[in-house]
Amino acid sequence: MPEPVKKTEEAQGGAGDPAAPDPAATYTVASAEAPTPAETPAAADTTPAAPQPESQAPDTKTDLTGLFTEKPQSGEVAVGENINFVAKVNAASLLKKPTIKWFKGKWMDLASKSGKNLQLKELYDRNSKVYTFEMQIIAAKPSFAGAYRCEVSSRDKFDSCNFDLTPNDNAKVMASDIGLPCPLVSSFCASASKSQVKSEPDEDVWEILQNAPASEYEKIAFQYGITDLRGMLKRLKKMKKEEKKSEAFLKKLDPAYQVEKGHKMKLCIDVANEDVDVKWLKNGQEIQSTGRYIFESVGNKRYLTINHCSLSDDATYTCVVGDEKCTTELFVKEPAVTITSNLEDQMVMKGERVELECEVSEEGATVKWEKDGVELTRDESFKYRFKKDGRKHVLIINEATKEDCGHYTVKTNGGESMAELMVSEKELEVYQNIADLTVKAKDEAVFKCEVSDETVKGIWYKNGVEVKADARTHITHIGRIHKLTIDDVKPEDQGDYTFVPEGYAFNLSAKLNFLDPPKIHLDCMGHTADSTIVVVAGNKLRLDVPITGDPAPTVVWTKGEKVKLLGDGRLHVESTKGHCIFTIEGADKQDEGLYSVIVRNPAGEDKADINVKVVDAPDPPSAPRILSVQEDSCVVQWDPPKSDGGNPIIGYVLERKKKKSYRWMRLNFDPYTDTTYEAKRMIEGVEYEMRVYAVNAIGMSCHSAASQPFIPVAPTSEPVGLCVDDISDTTISLKWRTPELLGSSELDGYGVEYCKEEKPKIWIPRNLRQTLIKKVEETINLVIPFQGKPRPVITWSKDGEPLNPKQVSVRNSDTDTILFIRKSERKDSGKYEVKLQIENVEDTASISIQIVDLPGSPEKLKIMDVWGFNVALEWKPPKDNGNCEITGYMVQKADKKTMEWYTVYELCRRTNCVVADLIMGNEYIFRIYAVNMVGLSLEPCFSADSAYIQKTGFEYKPPTYKEHDFSEAPKFTHPLVSRSVIAGYNATLSCSVRGIPKPKVTWYKNKMDISNEAKYRMFSKQGVLTLEIRKPCSFDGGVYMCKAVNASGEDVVECKLEIRPLIPIQQYFHIPKNSGKGGSDPILDGCT
């Protein structure tokens, strides 16, 4: 409740005069004619300061009954000079810094006029705790004249005082009083001077108005250029009031009284007539005599005693005697509120309700709650609730969190109490654990869990690695339920999934099992030579096929379209874990063909074809034919067998015997690959027979039919001594001697042949023109074609040295030469040269061969540094590079607990690297393989030391998402409407507002916050705001403003409230009976 102050008769606006108009009502009429602020600083108020009569009560401005310790005093100043007004406030008993406002007239706030002619200052003395407020008027002008008001407020306390400023310039003061603009002052004075020539000297317009009837006011005002009719009427009224003395009262009530709550207050007046009856009014309503209100009459004195004053007694009191009345304001001051029951320390679990309760000495007292020195308010989320129950005050926190820990203080104007609140984490309960899942390919996998606290967040992990949301993976958190959804499940999604609640030292785990469709794992399938399974006739055929699938698939074997049944005793089918086996006992040629194996389970099926080939010894060749015979030899020829038994013929074996003998003798023990053979060491003249065997990888065929019998006969030897006897242009003569051996038959003649000579030339194939690279133990077979006649002499060398016949074989023909190495070694690397020579002509060529091998292992692997989850490694290249360039290194790591090796880098080209993403708390060792074009080194290089990844705390930063901004600045959808109400009846002002988040609403009267005033009640429902004013009096009139504020902005709406008393309008102006002849007065009608 605001503290009371005493007010002067000027502040009351003639409250003691029954005919005085209500200030709020009069101002409302004049506002339509008020000049704009741009005219003069004092343009908002044109009411002159009425002169005080000699019989008026002494000035009470210096009576200190409120917040002021020193009030500003009225003053006079010469035009163009400066004047200061000083107000002082003692802040020792205030909870909040006082706020000062300076007004010109009734409503003009001078804070907006501060500048060249007006300066506002503020000082504070820390020792005395006194605030000094100063208003300085610089270069005063006549237009600055008028009534001023100073208002000070501090939370639930309020005080004000009035003072006047009078510049010493009569002409301009008069112009300001009657509402003339400043530019018209000179013209007004000029017109006045001119009128002096035509009319009576020293003619006063105010004397004319006083003597004129009210119906002539408008005409006179127009004649003398008076535009402010309201100001004119007001001045006339004061002039009449000054001349009139009260006939009913000898002593009136003081302007204001102050009393402490619960105490007794006695109001006293002196009346002129001892026998007269008086009536006492409270806010315009007559007071009835009760136990609290006591009326007394002692001689000329009349008393009103109010016992046990409460806040409801803070009102305007009026004493009425006949047609006269006097009015005062009673301010009820609340005593200091003390805390009788202190707050108590509390410890609660997270999420529980907290109630901090205290008890004060007075019911309905106002308290302030603070947390760690910061004032608590009803924020948008309604986190804090404040409850009053008599003298008890309760601070309620619905769901306590860790942020609510701290020291809470409740303060009153007479003391304070503090308590500590501690909030501890409560154990998180798991209502639904995540379960293992088994899903098919392209299905959806959903892991779901439910915990007791819906505010708890969490992180999902797969095999220890955090799961990130993507196009297939969705992470949701709705209330207490956490979900991880994986669309279009793939085999790589299989693993162990873990949900870790944030802030709790436990986790929930489950496994995702991929429903594996059946799969046949065969390296050879189909009809190619590499995919054919060969079995020797008569042997067992066993087809062992690895299969996978969960659940275990069923197996069906077919050959062509026919399902293999188990009725045949030679066929057997069995299935074991991971294998299906098909067996044929004693395979024969009819078992050859394409076999199919089909595996099925609920996830699907798979099929594989296996080509089976049954091989046997070849058929016998055809009977051999004798092509020629010699003295002790013959040349035999035969045709290959019709069937090779399913395997290529690798050669033949020949036998011979004498015609009359039964004993066959083998001529060769190694298979002979050609079909023409020269048999030697035979006896001339003896009859022989020949037969042949075909040989393949399986074995030897039956012998062929015997050849026709033949007898070896010696042929004639070659002629000797061939030489050129004579040469001509077209002929050449040759001569020779007869053969030394003629054989068993006579010589029939000679055959002569000739050919053209060719120079030797080596043709190197294109693939041998660059270095030939071969791996160790690979076969080298170089075929080098050439030309030259007669047949040239061929010589091979390596690096200028002859070839080693034990390691390298060379075979020559008439058109090419072949270099053959069965198993190459690294020492076979080098430059090979081949030379052709025919007499004195020769040709040479060279071929480079590089034999490469696996590299040696790297050396000296060291751990150079360990930081965070990273390890830096460094090593040296191997001494043996395998006779080729090192292309890189394979880096692997292993946890010492499991010793399972994982590849970090497939191919690292440098001799150092950084291994990242290691798991905290594990100890690792490392190994390095060297890689060249052949492959990995046989042995790795291990790190001598291990690297331990320290456990370090880290702060998880959740991903940020740009959320849609739904915020909206406050906007009033329905404004406040100006109203005019009758005093003593409750009044309401309504408007509606919208905004996101919900705006904070504050009500103001004349720009002063009235949120904590007991006289007003504020309501807010669905955006509709209502202000209820309980039994308003004349002082409740003014400008009411509603302000809505949120984080996005603010909006303001205002209206004017006029309070009308229950008094006939004729009493405002004392209209005489002869004021007009019928009809209504337009001036008075406008004032009403």
Image (cartoon, helix red, strand yellow):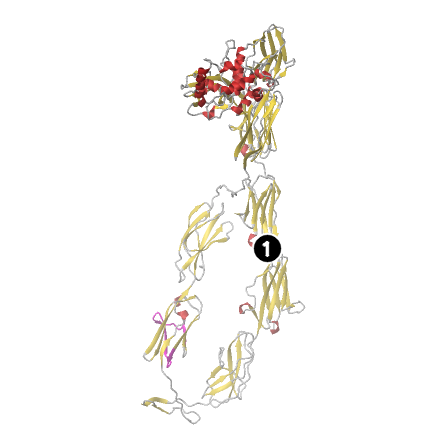
1081 up-or-down from 1050: above or below: above
Q: Could you tell me the amino acid type at mark 1?
A: Ala
Magenta residues (range)? 787-811
**Image-quadrant location for residue 1071:** top right
Residue at x-position 51% and y-position 29% = 372
145 up-or-down from 543: above or below: above
- In the rendered image, residue 627, in percent from the top left (x then y), is placed at 48, 86
Q: Residue 557 magenta-drawn?
A: no
**Image-quadrant location for residue 790:** bottom left
Q: Nearer the viewer, residue 646 or 1004?
A: 1004
- In the rendered image, residue 514, in percent from the top left (x then y), is placed at 59, 54
Per the image, the residue denoted by label 1 is 441
**Image-quadrant location for residue 1084:** top right
- In the rendered image, residue 64, in percent from the top left (x then y), is placed at 50, 15
Q: Is residue 65 visible?
A: no
The secondary element bearing badge 1 is classed as: loop
Classify residue 552 as left or right of residue 634.
Answer: right
